[in-house]
Image (cartoon, rainbow, N blue to C red):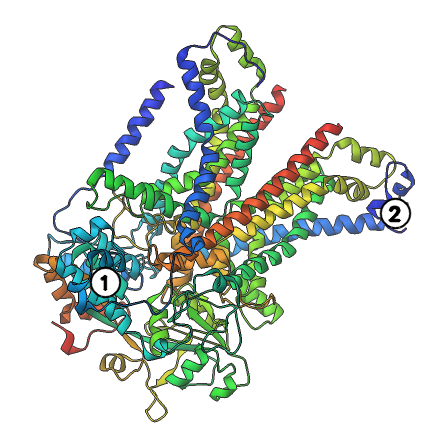
Amino acid sequence: MKMKTMTIGILLAALILAGAPRAVAGTVTAKGSDTMVILAQKWAEVYMQKSTGTKIQVTGGGSGTGFAALQNQTCDLANASRKIKANEIGSYIKAFGKRPTEYKVAMDGLSVYVSAENTVKELSLDQLDQVFSGRIKNWKELGGTDAPITVYSRENSSGTYEFFKEHVLKGKDFASSAQTMPGTAAVLQAVAKDKNGIGYGGAAYGAGAKHLAVKKDDSTPAIEPTEEAVVGGTYPISRFLFIYLNPALDKGEIAGYLTWIRSDEGQKLVKDVGYFPLPKNLRQ
Amino acid sequence: MGIHRGHKARPLEWVAEKLIFAISLSAILMVFLIFLFVAREAWPIFTGSMNSAAIQPVLQASDTAKLKPEVLQSYLGLTKAGFTAMDRESIQALMEVRQAAMDELPASVRSDKDANLNTVSWKYLIQPHQWTGYDKPEYIWQPISTINKYNIIPLVIGSIKASLVALAFSVPLALGAAIYVSQLARPALKEWLKPAIEMLAGIPSVVVGSFAYIFLATVLQKFLGYESRLNALLAGVALGFAIIPVVFSIAEDALTSVPRAYTQAALALGASKWKAAWQIGLPAAIPGVFAAVVLGFGRAIGETMIVLLASGNASIVSWSVFDSTRTMTATIAAEMAEAVFGGNHYRILFLIGALLFVVTFFSNLAGDLIIHRLKAKMEGKV
Amino acid sequence: MTPASPASINAGSANGFRSASFDYTSYFFTGITGLAVALILTMLFVLLGTILANGWPSLSWRFITANPQKDFFEPASAGVLPMIVGTSVRVILMTIFVIPVGVITAIYLTEYAHASSLSTRVIRGAVNNLAGVPSIVFGLFGAGFFVHFVGKSMDGFIYGAAGTKVWGQECLLWASMTLAVMTLPVVIVATEESLRAILPGLREASLALGATKLQTIVRIVVPQALPGIMTGGILAVGRAAGEVAPILFTGAAYYMADLPKSLSNQFMDLGYHVFILSTQSPDIEKTRTTLYATVLVLLLLTFALNFVAVLIRSKIRRQMRAAH
């Protein structure tokens, strides 16, 4: 027994010690938004093949997790699908005395999905506002069939939710009856299966549902969420994706990597994973 | 065990014995720690020291130099050490950020009658309130909003509703199965029926959840033709997968623990197998069956992944089983990852966790006490 | 005949039992309860059948051993190796933490404590209660206690107040510890059962030969109970392997390019991956086969473990019956 206890003790101690951090030179760690994980991983892979010697590690967890990690110095780059908030900047300043540097790295268009069977083809921002805040409750009012609207939304922890709320609902609350899905795929799945459903999410997602064309107001034409429309800024619901970092680290290989991401070469990869590249004037 | 005589204890023996006793207390320690640490994070809500008002008092950043250090320190929420460690520029930057955050507030929020309310005070957590933009006083859960609304009533109702549906669906099934397996089935059949039903307990809840959400949802909607594809009914049925084995096991145990002599006496008097089970076995085991239901409820209300995937998560106050429903557990799972550490939302989620702990604690306690009594009674009578 | 209400039956009225020559109610109710059994089994088979039918075709050696370097939603590049590794490592670590504590508690309860003493009753109550705490509350506890309290204190102790953050974040170690707390009751109950199954005569013989109580426990009782302890461990692993809620805030990662290298790393997990696949995929129809295959891997893992536990347990029970 004594031997065993000792063995277990030694084993445990070894395990704990093995957990001690080993500073690996040349490893860049990126953490944050789950929406951006696949994209960030793609960038990392291609860049690592191109410039040997740099090692890039990507983890998800959510935009907020990325900001927290940036502030704790457990990552170098924070991927974010939303802009950093004032209190997050505040806690960052408390840790470093400076604001983090922000880079726009890609664009994303938010599509409004309805069932493929739905006869409605386009809606204005104002109509969307009323549908998602629960003031329009029947498809009849939008020129569709006489059927109640089922609203699908995202969990309030997602950047997509906040963006849609701010830009389409102008900060108002979503209808309480809106069902909140734990992922864009879940929204899409629900809308595809529900002929009275309406939901929103990344334009790159798509199979199974119809993407509505969106009008800025009644006088402007309805725009489909295509690449030119999103990148050109004519599609009314589009957003940037960001990378934040400590300004002190924005040099050497990290700066090189960030420049490459925003170059034509890096931006080409954006499309492969279903987002939209930056407009030309924002590239490097 | 009853044997205490042995070789004379050595000092080491004494130490080992004390050590074993100390370690055996770890279960108690853990229950205590769980409550302590979940409640600890929620504590500022109880004491009312959090303020979630959208409009917070602002000190002008340009006045930084004129302000007293103590005032600055408490305004910026810094510790004494943290404050002295910061240089002037950082403090200035921090002041600017604070001010900018308030300046960025749209005029609509500034003029909102609710902008000065502390929405994490108990009044707004459990009572309806007529928020700006709503027609009547309502229970609203909108934790990420211009005016954050943290009313937990929709979540409590959602949890209770989903659990009740789950019980209504699974108790008859589990109880019927328990009666059949313990009283009516041939021993050979019983040998494999019991593990087969208990196999349900081995299926991870995330698997049941995604099965319900991808497959069962479509099937049920096709049969029953309701509006909302994901709803309390679906969540309840899916929860059934998780609680049927719980209710079945306990009920079956209780029924089996009824002394054989009872039912055999009835059989000898000419009762059918069924009558002996229904009129003698079941009444004797009723407390155990009740305990099974209570423990099943505890399991249902605490289940997370199934309801997160199957319930639709709409935070509405409605008792209709065909409406989507948002439970306490799913809310924690969905929102915790992005909640700012130590913020209002974070603390409210821990408050919900503490509430869940208390509810399940008492349902477990009640269930265990009933089973304990039943056992004592059964053993005493034999 | 009219079915008599249970209340009307008491010891005296034996007549109430006399049945007609052919008892329709009896057949009817036997049928009803039998139907309940059939329904539950149908539920089980539909669930398992759907998963098996959809998952089996896409289950391949490549899928099990591939690291999804590119895109895990894409069936061609999907793989579950890092998830299998993550899940395995976290349950193995959990076993290391939970077995000693669980076994010692069970030893105290069976060998030292009086069955009716206050300490026994309180410990037993705590064990039962621990078994009923919702898994998501364990997640909150893990985040509040292990990550933010123990982890942060460890960092402060090792690296100083302003130092780096190593343990004060979600990682493998804290996820395993959280699961260890969650499965403690499973191990305690299983071990207790096997300790009670040991013949008292063995203990008495050992004591009579002059062994101390501790020696008896270490040399006689525990080795005898080993299969039972193993069962407890396996049951705990079976329970923990598929749990997602407790590790959501304590260590599971959405994506990691590399396998975890240290206890302070996060990890990818099979159960969490099932959740991700079913809610985050850009094209659900395309991902469906991958999802079912992943579910199948998870189920095979947990069922295999549970099955082994059931086998060992039934063997112990048979031995016990034979011995008594």
Q: Is residue C28 left or right of residue A15?
A: right
**Closer to the observer: label 1 or label 2?**
1
Q: Residue furthest top?
A: C209
Residue linked to disc 2: C22
Q: Chain of mark 1?
A: A
| Percent coordinates x, y for residue A84 in the rendering | 25, 65
| Percent coordinates x, y for residue B191 in the rendering | 64, 37
Which disc, if any, is residue A89?
1
B15 up-or-down from B256: above or below? above
* Residue C196 figure quarter: top right
Give the crowd class for mark 1: few <14, some 14-19, many >=20 residues within 10 Å. many
Q: Do marks 1 and 2 share a subunit?
A: no
Quarter of the image with the C terminus of chain C in it? top right
Residue type for callout 2: Phe
| Percent coordinates x, y for residue A270 in the rendering | 23, 69
Residue type for callout 1: Ile
Q: Is residue A93 left or right of residue C309?
A: left
Q: Residue at x 52, y 45 (%)?
A: B202
Q: Is residue C51 visible?
A: no
Q: Residue at x 49, y 19 (%)?
A: C221
Q: Chain of mark 2?
A: C
| Percent coordinates x, y for residue B59 in the rendering | 24, 67
Is label 1 in contact with label 2 (beta carbons under 8 Å)?
A: no
Q: Residue at x 55, y 67 (%)?
A: B317
**Residue nearest the viewer, comparing B54 with B60:** B60
| SS at badge 1 | helix
* Residue B119 figure quarter: bottom left
Q: Is residue B381 left or right of residue A5?
A: right
